[in-house]
Amino acid sequence: MIKPFIPVIIGTVTLFACTPASKRDANIEKKTENQNTLFKPVAPVEDTQELILPEGFDFNILFAEGDTVETTTGIGLAKGNHDMIIYLPINGSSEHGHLYVSHETLTADPITGDGGGGTILEIKKENGIWKSIGTKKNVDFSAVGGTAYNCGGTLTPQGTILSGEELFPQSAEKLKDKKFKTLKGMNGFSLTENFGWMVEIDPKAGKAIRKVYNFGRYTHEDAYCTPDGKAVYLTDDHYPAVFFKFECEQPNDYSKGQLYAYKQSTDGNSGSWMALPMDQKSLVNARDIAIAKGATMFVRLEWIKEYNGKLYISETGNDSTDYTSFIAKGGTIPNYLEQSCKYADGKYHDPFGRILEFDLKTNRMREFLAGGPIEKDGGNFSSPDGLFIATIQNKPYLIISEDLTNITQGRVAPRAEKNGWVINEIYFLDLSIENPTRNDLMRFAIAPRGCETTGSYFTPDGKTYFVNIQHPDKENPAPFNKSTTIAIQGF
């Protein structure tokens, strides 16, 4: 068990948000006296090569890049770039279950499979400490022609897992250059067209079932399945990004149904869903088709979680995006971007991103919490990515992981910017707070230099928090010199 590193408090850093000052100040003037008893928030730091947690919390490592895994062809070494985590309890237990971990990679490996991947491991809490027990198993994607860059996703109502292929190779030549031998086109799709989908996985069998072509091909990040199995909401990590929804003809059956793209109303108080063509050519180019029909264009939609009839979506932002050509094709801009991030050059400057809130009843998409300076401690909330919602001590919390798009404009401390150090943080936000501000964020963790924190998942009892330390700097001291999956306790 590793004890947390105690942070060093730094002075106030000058920070800038994309929102003009006259509009921004109204959002950060409110100072909230946080009645938090969950943990004592950690202070921002200039740099760390360790994991910083609040006092009273500790962690242990369950799985790391390069661990031995069992495959269908023998024993191999686990891939890295750990991303999504799904905890699958055994008999409902919060102390014994399986973890599914995605690998956001595109590597050549004849044993674990070319492309991306996934690993399943059994874990158990013994004498207060989580341990990996038994053999870690490599997920077999051969039945679907291989996979690539497995990112976010979700557990479906019927117990399968949806894993998003975030990126996809642009040409077969690039795949050949990497010496891939096992990847192939399937079901009438070419080699490159067979990537960029949601992949459905049977975690019990440890293998992929199908690529869900009806969800469309784009930069898949995450998905939310309604409990009744009738609809799936899908995010697109791109700029421009489109918000999609698939409605099943029969619950939990993704083979028949209709794909839609979202268009926000001009005033931002509602929106509509536009049906998209369901032929193969259109599905391969789902985003382009949606934009041509007038879909609203976002700035990299990331993870998506539901609470009390609302979807919370991380929009990670981008320093500067020119949407001129896409607007000419028919795409529309969200009203909050028009109001706060459009500059005289016609581009949209959105370096900090935000959390969005989508009302499932009214189709209203609004800015719930804008990124930018945190007035109370001189920190900065930027580039939200991984999300999870957990109820702890009878309160709902939105857990937000950062994945910085850049380190300029005050997103890291001056010394970190000078040295090119990426420092990401994890925040908790009490969802019972009406109209929260950045001052309501509670900084739970500061991640080791260079890494993205992702895969957030809690046990059902809310006492153990699983998270991935993805692609940390290789010069960090062990264990955070490679991708790892850890269990955090102390709640």
Image: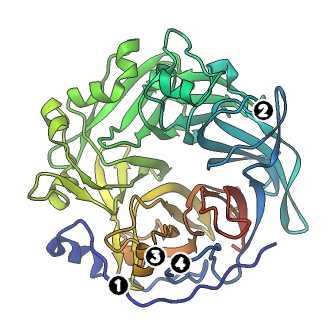
Whichever of callouts 2 and 4 sits on the residue coming sooner in the sequence is 4
Q: Nearer the viewer, mark 1 or mark 4?
A: 4
Whichever of callouts 1 and 4 sits on the residue coming sooner in the sequence is 1
Dot 2: element:
loop
Callout 2 environment at 10 Å: few (<14), some (14 to 19), or many (20+)?
few
In contact (CB < 8 Å): disc 3 and disc 2: no
In contact (CB < 8 Å): disc 1 and disc 3: no
Q: Amino acid at mark 1?
A: Lys
In contact (CB < 8 Å): disc 3 and disc 4: yes
Q: Amino acid at mark 2?
A: Lys
Dot 4: element:
loop
Mark 2 and mark 1: Cα distance apart in space: 48 Å
Where does the image place residue 238, in percent across and percent down from the top left? 36, 42
Q: Which residue is mark 2?
A: 204
Mark 2 and mark 4: Cα distance apart in space: 41 Å
Q: Quadrant of the N terminus?
A: bottom right
Q: Which residue is mark 4?
A: 47
Q: From the viewer's side, name the closer residue of 362 and 157.
A: 157
Q: Is residue 77 left or right of residue 141?
A: right
Q: Amino acid at mark 4?
A: Asp
Q: Which residue is mark 1?
A: 31
- Check residue 416 in the rendering and tell me which mark sits there, or answer none: 3
Q: Residue at x 55, y 82 (%)?
A: 42
- Check residue 490 in the rendering and tell me which mark sits there, or answer none: none
Q: From the viewer's side, name the closer residue of 380 and 87.
A: 380
